[in-house]
């Protein structure tokens, strides 16, 4: 507790509180003063709580502090039953309650400032459900939630940018570099525009170029989409192949699946896996580790030459001879070991066979997996070529059995159709014969009626019988309909009476409710009108305030730009004044070295040098003008001389071609060629 009080006092004595407390004065504070200190700490975190608690009631102060502590997610020490004690202690300013709160607030001030800032925008307002039934309130609430989500995303991006390590200097350098590049590009574009303006139909060519660029971008996007869709299709095909292979294996396993067979197969797999895990794989791992250690030893040792190798081979031969001698001695001395050696040999043979079989089984499984992959690839190729899937194994057998069953059913149905066609032919023939007999009987009957003088009697009799049958049917139908209608009327009357008796108390209860509904609808209309007028006023005020804020922001931005512009002009003027002062100081200085640094002396020196250079150049020009005539004559003479020598050369060459003989004269030991 003393460390806690020391920390609180130390923090309160620093910025921004500056309380000048010590342990005694802080411990002797009154409850109201202690609450004020707590309120000042809360005001440092959230400026909304910068109030004097003497102007509030204790309940308001406690409610406000509990609200901000809940937003800051402060958890009081103890369990949930101590919350009432915590609230009472916060109201009366109890030290055991306020000291931990102060310690927590001062320990996490920066983090709690950020949390309070976020709570100002992320604490959701509780809108009653009856108000949300209004469309305007519902839309406003929805817009409020969308803005809250946008604030979350923007705050996350801001935090990421702060933690990403970007510095303002680098950003400014990048901005200046980009602005320079932009200026260069603008100048280049202007130059190109000036060049293009001289070309005919340049506007149409520019439009075509822009269309070409748009189409190229579209082509690139389409190519990218095509590649993505191909990748997705390839992944989907691979998933489908894996699923089909798995389904086939499951069907194959379930085709002859019996509990005993499945259990036996699982036991064999468990035995094989346990053998691989407990015996084979540890041995392989141990051997790999030994070889790795040996390799590391070989790598760590120095490079060996031929003598070292011969020495090692000699040591290996000695050790092998000693091992052979020891084994022979053991076999001679231990007779019981001879009995056990047979069992050891058999066990070694069995273990080797087991290892070889396990390796063969592993190789067979790998080969089966490779073959299944090849089959899947071949089936996919077949499916891509003709669109049909190749049947294999049990599926082909099932297909053949189905085909045999369908062929049998087809034969039976074909036989039935043939029998039915034959029977239909017999019946048609029978019908024709009966019709012929009926016609002959009718003719005989008509002849008899004519003889007796009662022709048409049979037709009239048949018509009367038909009409009597129809009349009986109509009478029966009328009777049934009348009975049904009477029964329906009775049922409806009874139902109406029952409904009236059942609805009578409901109607009595509904009458006052209707009146109440009318009153509530009237009150709702009045409240809605008030709400609409208030909302319209608030919106108009809000729009006015937004316009004022926008105008003030524009004035502020104009003032800032004018301020920066004036500051730049002032800085430039200060630099110029400083340069002028330095120039006057250097010019007036008695020191010769300082005067030489003055711009006036430097410029005068440069002017003198340029004047001397001009004099020299004028003298050179004068000498060149004077010697120009003789030099030109000399050049002409040299050109004439050159032409003369060319003519002599050509004559000499022609003379040389005409000479056909030559004489060689040897005088005083020398050979001379005379042409």
Image (cartoon, helix red, strand yellow):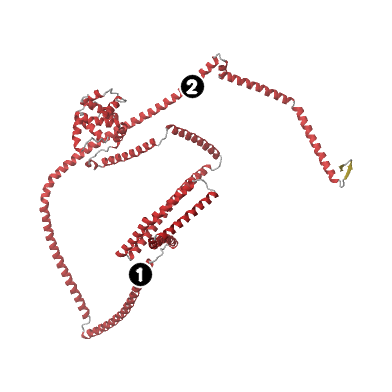
292 lies left or right of 612: left
Q: Residue at x 16, y 70 (%)?
A: 476
45, 354: nearer the viewer: 354
Is residue 412 in view? yes
Q: How many marks?
A: 2
- From the image, tell me which residue sits under label 1: 402
Q: Residue at x 64, y 21 (%)?
A: 611
Q: Position of residue 353 (x, y in %)?
A: 40, 62
- From the image, tell me which residue sits under label 2: 575
Relative to 475, is 534 above or below? above
Quarter the C terminus occupies:
top right
| Mark 1 or mark 2, whichever is nearer to me | 1
Q: Position of residue 430 (x, y in %)?
A: 29, 81
* Quarter of the rendering containing residue 365: bottom left
Distance (Cα) linking label 1 and label 2? 103 Å
491, 268: nearer the viewer: 268
Say which element carries label 1.
Answer: helix
Residue, far front: 333
Q: Residue at x 45, y 56 (%)?
A: 323
Quarter the N terminus occupies:
top left
Residue, far top: 590
Of the image marks 1 and 2, the number of the one nearer the N terminus? 1
Q: Position of residue 60 (x, y in %)?
A: 20, 30
664, 424: nearer the viewer: 664
């Amino acid at each position: 507790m003393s460390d806690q009080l020391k920390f609180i006092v130390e923090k309160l004595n620093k910025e921004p509180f500056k309380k000048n407390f010590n342990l005694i004065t802080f411990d002797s504070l009154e409850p109201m003063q202690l609450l004020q200190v707590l309120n000042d700490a809360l005001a440092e975190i959230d400026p909304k709580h910068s109030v004097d608690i003497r102007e509030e009631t204790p309940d308001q102060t406690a409610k406000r502090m509990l609200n901000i502590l809940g937003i800051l997610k402060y958890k009081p020490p103890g369990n949930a039953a101590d919350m009432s004690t915590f609230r009472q202690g916060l109201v009366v300013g109890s030290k055991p309650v306020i000291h931990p709160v102060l310690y927590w607030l001062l320990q996490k001030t920066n983090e709690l400032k950020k949390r309070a800032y976020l709570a100002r925008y992320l604490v959701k307002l509780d809108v009653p459900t009856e108000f949300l039934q209004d469309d305007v309130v519902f839309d406003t609430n929805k817009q409020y939630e969308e803005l809250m989500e946008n604030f979350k995303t923007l705050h996350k991006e801001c935090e990421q940018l702060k933690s990403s390590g970007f510095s303002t200097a680098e950003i400014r350098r990048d901005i200046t570099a980009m602005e320079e590049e932009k200026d260069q590009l603008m100048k280049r574009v202007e130059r190109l525009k000036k060049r293009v303006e001289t070309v005919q139909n340049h506007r149409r060519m520019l439009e075509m170029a822009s269309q070409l660029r748009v189409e190229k971008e579209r082509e690139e996007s389409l190519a990218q989409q095509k590649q993505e869709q191909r990748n997705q299709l390839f992944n989907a095909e691979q998933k489908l192949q894996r699923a089909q292979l798995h389904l086939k294996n499951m069907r194959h396993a379930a085709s002859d699946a019996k509990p005993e067979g499945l259990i036996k197969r699982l036991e064999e797999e468990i035995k094989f896996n346990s053998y691989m895990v407990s015996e084979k794989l540890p041995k392989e791992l141990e051997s790999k580790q030994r070889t790795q250690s040996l390799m590391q030893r070989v790598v760590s040792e120095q490079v060996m030459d031929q003598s070292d190798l011969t020495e090692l081979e000699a040591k290996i031969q000695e050790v092998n001879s000693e091992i052979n001698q020891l084994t022979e001695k053991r076999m001679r001395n231990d007779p019981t070991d001879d009995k056990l050696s047979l069992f050891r040999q058999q066990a070694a043979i069995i273990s080797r066979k087991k290892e070889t079989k396990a390796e063969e089984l592993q190789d067979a499984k790998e080969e089966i997996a490779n073959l299944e992959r090849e089959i899947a690839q071949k089936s996919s190729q077949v499916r891509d070529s003709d669109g049909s899937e190749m049947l294999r194994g049990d599926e082909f057998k099932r297909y053949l059995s189905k085909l045999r069953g369908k062929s049998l059913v087809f034969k039976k149905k074909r036989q039935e159709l043939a029998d039915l066609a034959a029977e239909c032919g017999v019946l048609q023939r029978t019908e024709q014969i009966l019709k012929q007999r009926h016609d002959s009987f009718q003719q005989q009957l008509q002849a008899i009626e004519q003889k007796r003088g009662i022709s048409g009697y049979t037709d009239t009799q048949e018509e009367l019988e038909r009409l009597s049958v129809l009349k009986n049917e109509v009478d029966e139908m009328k009777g049934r309909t009348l009975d049904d209608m009477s029964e329906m009327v009775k049922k409806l009357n009874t139902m109406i009476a029952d409904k009236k008796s059942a609805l009578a108390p409901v109607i009595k209860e509904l009458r006052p409710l209707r009146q109440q509904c009318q009153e509530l609808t009237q009150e709702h209309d009045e409240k809605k009108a008030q709400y609409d007028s208030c909302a319209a006023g608030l919106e108009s005020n809000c729009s006015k305030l937004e316009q004022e804020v926008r105008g003030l922001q524009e004035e502020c931005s104009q003032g800032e730009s004018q301020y920066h512009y004036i500051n730049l002009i002032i800085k430039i003027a200060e630099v110029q004044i400083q340069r002028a002062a330095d120039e006057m100081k250097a010019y007036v200085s008695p020191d010769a070295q300082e005067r030489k640094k003055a711009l006036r002396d430097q410029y005068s020196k440069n002017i003198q040098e340029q004047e001397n250079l001009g004099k020299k150049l004028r003298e050179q020009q004068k000498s060149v003008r004077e010697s120009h005539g003789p030099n030109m004559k000399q050049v002409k003479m040299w050109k004439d001389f050159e032409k003369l020598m060319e003519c002599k050369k050509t004559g000499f060459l022609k003379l040389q071609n005409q000479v056909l003989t030559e004489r060689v004269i040897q005088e005083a030991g020398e050979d001379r060629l005379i042409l």
